[in-house]
Image (spheres, coloured by chain):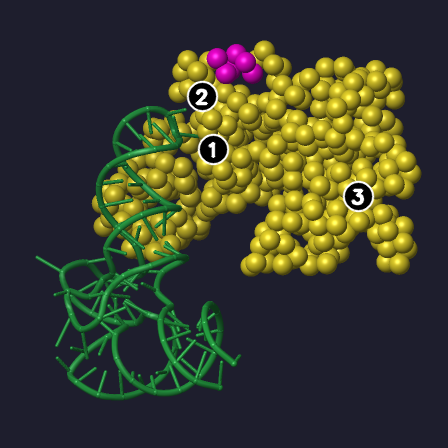
Chain colours: A yellow, B green
Amino acid sequence: MSGKVDPQLFDDLTWRGLIHQTTDENLPKWLTEGPRVVYAGFDPTAHSLHVGHLVALLTLRRFQKAGHRPIALIGGATGMIGDPSGRSDERNLLSTEELESNVQSIHQQMQSVLKFDDSQGAMLLNNFDWMKGYGYLTFLRDIGKNFPVNVMLSKDSVKSRLERTDSGLSYTEFSYMLLQAYDFVYLNKYHDCTLQIGGSDQWGNITAGIDLGRRMHGATLFGITSPLLTKKDGTKMGKTADGAVWLSPEKTSPYAFYQFWLNVGDEEVGTCLRYFTDLPKETIEELDQSRSEDAGRRESQKKLAEEVTRLIHGEAGLTKAINATETLFQGGPIENLTDKDLLEIFHDVPRAQIERGQLNQGELTIIDAFVVAGLCSSKGEARRLIDQGGARINNEVVSDSQKNLSPDDLASESVIVLKKGKKKFALLRCE
RNA sequence: GGGGGGUUACCCGAGCGGUCAAAGGGGCCAGACUGUAAAUCUGGUGGCACAGCCUUCACAGGUUCGAAUCCUGUACCCCCCA
């Protein structure tokens, strides 16, 4: 590792609003003195990372770009336990098979964000590797001995759970902190790691690791937490009505991913630009300025969506997302497109098969079409939708709920595009 | 063990013999406005063969011309006394 690091890193993080708390006032100076090994943990509780993981992942990336060495720690062991921090109820435990498969795919995803290639590149470690052989008695003697219960009880993550009367805290979850603390100490001992970053809900776990390092080895360790990103209404960022926004293109298509960022509210978009893009300060401040003059142009949202989508899905994914967006929201009728075009643009839109004969005979009512396509859960709902003017075929409003579909309604060789309201689409495809 | 209260649509919650598919609010869906926003306003929100019919008010029975509403039993929840 070259000895050079970017001395601006901490200032940049501060300007971006990514610093919530630090464990030591000398930390900014300490960071400029040479390359450090920094780690953040990711629980493999799902098959894919989601937008909620992105802040930590991108912060690791910023450290890497500034000349430090990141470790992405996958919590194969801790994921079996479940972190009680910020949770109101007990987690379900995952099987080892699920965990193993999750770890694989998460590793895959991280490669577009961190550079793992060279010998000084990022490291991906799984704490299951060093925890699996750790005996209970040994662990209690080595690690547990260093944890005063009164200190553990005073941690916010534990305290808040104990104060709830409607859900308890199992001994298993209570022990989570020891495992994460030990991770830090382990990484320090074997990989020279001296800094842990995480969301502000990780403060308790991070300081536990720092305390443990000092008690066991007299090590001096550091920690930084970032604010948890919430929307104006207090709900967590990264969730839509349909659930989490995933990084995996199988779970959230590049189009849907792009749309998520494009729809970020004016109040949040400034923060998002700072958190989720590498855009320099000047560019972001220009966008702030532009937004205060005419937020309706949505330059900030477009730039944000573009940057983040490119990072996660690459240039090709971004192009697809933009093409689909333009087609879907240009407003005019959908025509002069081929099956291939439509199926590509509407890649992740739900679709249903219908019989060609049904269409030719005019046997399919428009009400049934919306139900079959899954846009409406009952015929009554479909009827209401049409009566209220919220139903479109190939982007043209249909007002007659008695209408039957015919071959004239095909947008291309075999596809009919149904639309509910402004943003929900479905395809009917006749064979 | 004794006494009292409760269980209503996705959620909260009114209804306490007919006019109840069931007030009100939240959520959700759609429309207007707009920027594919926010806020606001309007309409909708059990199903269907939709001016009508069918199935709903914890569950099972009963009384009645007629029950979410009354009675009996069952399950679950809460409170008070022991």
The amino acid type found where label 2 is placed reads Arg
Q: Is residue A385 above or below residue A17?
A: below
Q: Is residue A301 above or below residue A179?
A: above
Residue that mark 2 sits on: A298
Q: Can residue A265 be spotted in the picture?
A: yes
Horizontal and vertical percent for residue A151? 75, 46
Mark 2 crowd level (few <14, some 14–19, many ≥20, 10 Å Cα): some
Mark in the foreground, 2 or 3: 3
Residue that mark 3 sits on: A181
Quadrant of the rendered structure where residue A180 is?
top right
The reply to the same-chain question for discs 2 and 3 is yes
Residue that mark 1 sits on: A232
Q: For the point 81% across and 27% down, which residue is it? A: A69
Q: Secondary structure at mark 2?
A: loop
Q: For the point 65% across and 29% down, which residue is it? A: A20
The chain letter under disc 1 is: A
Residue in front for this viewpoint, B72 or A261: B72
The amino acid type found where label 3 is placed reads Ala
The amino acid type found where label 1 is placed reads Lys
Q: Secondary structure at mark 1?
A: loop
